[in-house]
Amino acid sequence: LRRALVLPILNCGASLALEGDDRIAWARLSLGPVALVPFRACQAEAFLASRPANEEAFARAAEIAAGECQPRTSVLRASREYRLEVLPVLVRRGLARAAEQARARA
């Protein structure tokens, strides 16, 4: 039997590749637990393709990603409202960090 259990409130995985002019060639966003199962935010990914890798694009993609989510209020995880408020921040930061890493690799 477990003596403890850790459940995430939110998580986001972000990865992207940049083209020579600092435009996004492709982006991948995975989110959880904001739906029945973890999933990729495909609408946000499609929005980012060919866009400049900047804060404005990341902010709009974060809004789109939040719209793709259906979190429930959970005693163990957090309220729906809290997760919908924090998710865009997490997505923006993840995309900014992914862009930073992509620039460093170039």
Image (tube, grey):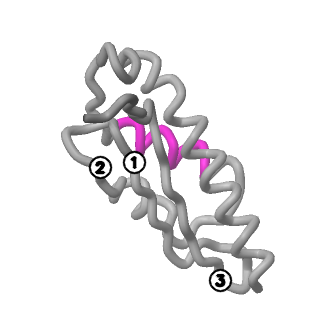
Q: Is residue 66 magenta?
A: yes
Residue located 39% across and 29% down the image: 4
Residue 99: percent from left, percent from top = 69, 65
Amino acid type assigned to the residue bearing label 3 in the image? Glu
Q: Which mark is residue 19?
A: 3
Q: Is residue 13 above or below residue 24?
A: above
Judged left or right of residue 77, residue 39 is left
Residue 30: percent from left, percent from top = 40, 55
Residue at image mark 2 = 38
Helix, strand or loop at label 1? It is strand
Figure label count: 3
Q: Quadrant of the C terminus?
A: bottom right
Q: Residue furthest left?
A: 36
Q: Which mark is residue 89?
A: none
Amino acid type assigned to the residue bearing label 2 in the image? Pro
Residue at image mark 1 = 31
Helix, strand or loop at label 2? It is loop
